[in-house]
Amino acid sequence: MAGERAATLSDVAREAGVSLATASRALNGSDRVVRPELQERVLAAASKLGYTPNANAQAMARGSTETVGLLVKDISDPYFSTIAGGLADEAEKHGLLVMLCNTGGQPEREQKFLAALRRQRSRAIVLAGSDTADVRHTSEVADLLTSYLDGGGRVAAISQPRLPVDTVVIDNHGGAKALAEQLVGLGYRRAAVLTGPEDLLVSAERHAGFAEGWLETTGSEPACVSDEFSWDGGRRAMTRLLENGRNNGAEVDCVFAVNDLMALGALAACRQAGIEVGPELAVAGFDDIATLRDVTPGLTTVRLPLADIGRLALELVLGKPSAELRKRSVHGEVVLRESTPPRS
Amino acid sequence: MAGERAATLSDVAREAGVSLATASRALNGSDRVVRPELQERVLAAASKLGYTPNANAQAMARGSTETVGLLVKDISDPYFSTIAGGLADEAEKHGLLVMLCNTGGQPEREQKFLAALRRQRSRAIVLAGSDTADVRHTSEVADLLTSYLDGGGRVAAISQPRLPVDTVVIDNHGGAKALAEQLVGLGYRRAAVLTGPEDLLVSAERHAGFAEGWLETTGSEPACVSDEFSWDGGRRAMTRLLENGRNNGAEVDCVFAVNDLMALGALAACRQAGIEVGPELAVAGFDDIATLRDVTPGLTTVRLPLADIGRLALELVLGKPSAELRKRSVHGEVVLRESTPPRS
DNA sequence: CTGAAAGCGCTAACAG
DNA sequence: CTGTTAGCGCTTTCAG
């Protein structure tokens, strides 16, 4: 019946003819033990009344909640949704609920969410993908986090070494460098990098790693074109690259887009320009997004264990707090596919 | 300082030299108004003390929370993550937090999450993708939902007409039927459908719609192969289909996989079998997953406005409650690409 | 317009 | 083992 006030613990206690405390002890396993007979009576009363504990009241009384917050830039981006999937699975194992915060990359939203999570007294917060080099914003976030930490909250970040919290560090530099070396090994000699905005850390790290690897093995620097960190950005960057090449004759034989989505956009640009990726021009990405593993031509990329990263971040944030900041490194693995055939 | 107890509203009140009630009224806009002078003093005290309201306490006192629950089968699946993205954006506009529940398709988990959401006194719950025909589970879920609704909660589902709640109905049948008609118009005559498990409603509806369209236009029934509702399932189903065709000569010229992922698996199977999709065999999917829009060959599919569906579901669940069940229909749009060229 | 006081539902000492 | 009794932090009548 819609009119009935939900049953409370005291209703259950009354119905079972026991005290409030006993009812509480019987319904949740406290350290105290209740005589089996009473235990049973309480359980029966609870189910008869359709009793559901009120998590908010419990949170108040206990001083702690069962929720963790997850901040991502865009949950519809497979990169983040895969991380979220791993984290959600791990959370479920711990009996925790995940508060999903989609920041859309907007600093204000990010700060708003952080405040909300603090209000909710979330046990922990995991930050994924808001790693900008914007100093002002970074320091405001750091302040918010510090006060959250002081309040007993726990925080971990994924790949944002600038924040003073436990971090799952993704070896963007190393992965991109390894990729460069393998490409050189395949016979490529003139590379270009398609990057995102320069203040985006992931992008900058991957760019730097690739450039370093390329320089060390070939002695030359790869060219570079910047645009958005997205499919469109990749397409535009590649289009510009092709135009430049035509104008000044500085053609490249190999292109590294700093993520798979950009690489896909680059592929589209090539197709439109009538260039056959693979035989005519090599293209590689980064991330190894699952749904993209079967595009044609197969995209060479650096595989990141995204779901594990999500799990790891939660483990880190749930683990025993330690004085010093913890770092957990995760490495990518180069996956060679048809988009970068050995160069004959 | 890590040792300091977080400031409470009474701390603020004392600091500002006003009563608890006044502090409360000043800090949240209640209907009562406070004199500007006091208002200011309270605000100053709050910021001086670094006061953050305790959402759990507010929830208790007010009897309502600022969270909504979202149940999805698998957040790392782009279908669900896109819906989640739209819903999360809409939630942010309403100042609501989203509790993400990843059921993994497991009925027990689903029920556990539902119970948790009820405990949390979530304002509303949106169910996406657990539409199975399992009667026992469905009725248990229906019971849980009913008691949640009785407690004042709101529920909406995406495409699960069996549940007694407001629903965003996806026209799977109509979309698949329209696709069938277009394919016939393109000149195809012998079709096969790659379906998921028969107790999965989306799959069954798309299958039925396609079959109906095909039958009405050609007078013949499409063949059918069932497997998992996944990339692997699509690959396996297609492989089996090709083997059968070879054995009994009943070759098809056109294959409809009930979702894009299966279609992609089918593409892989074709490639492996040395069949060129497009010229030799047409393949179509359903959903129009964004990251897949640029695979080669371009996949013909039925585009679903996934993000809008998420938004719509939240609107529905937040809207004024009405006695009768509301349904909001969403239609797909056939998108023809290279995987189904006009047949000459 | 402001303050006092009564809860919201539950847990956790503290006594029996 | 069980019951009594304070709160947890905030909102909201109900009086001033």
Image (cartoon, coloured by chain):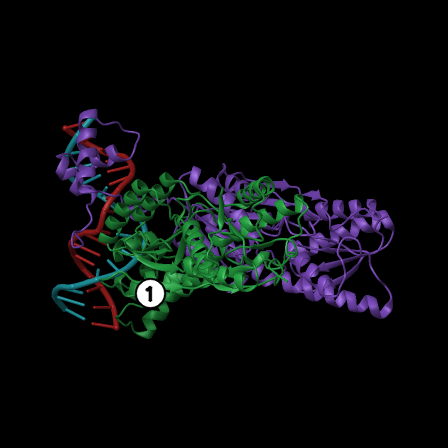
Chain colours: A green, B purple, C cyan, D red
Q: Residue at 70% of width from left, 60% of height from top?
A: B266
Q: What chain is tagged by disc 1? A: A
Q: Residue at 41% of width from left, 44% of height from top?
A: A198
Q: Residue at 75% of width from left, 44% of height from top?
A: B178
* Any part of residue A189 in sight: yes
Pinpoint residue A74: horizontal percent, then vertical percent.
47, 47
Q: Nearer the viewer, residue A89 or A271?
A: A271
* Any part of residue B114 in sight: no
Identify the secondary structure beneath mark 1. Answer: loop
Query: Crowding at label 1, few (<14), some or many (≥20) Cα neighbours within 10 Å?
Result: few
Q: Quadrant of residue B307?
A: top right
Q: Quadrant of residue A308?
A: bottom left
Q: Nearer the viewer, residue A36 or A297?
A: A297
Residue B72 vs residue B213: left or right?
Answer: left
According to the image, label 1 marks what residue? Answer: A28
Q: Nearer the viewer, residue B104 or B140?
A: B104
Mark 1: amino acid: Asn
Pinpoint residue A91: horizontal percent, then vertical percent.
41, 61
Residue A92 vs residue B51: left or right?
Answer: right
Figure label count: 1
Q: Nearer the viewer, residue A288 or A341?
A: A341
Q: Quadrant of residue B269?
A: bottom right
Pinpoint residue B127: horizontal percent, then vertical percent.
53, 51
Pinpoint residue D4: horizontal percent, then vertical percent.
18, 60
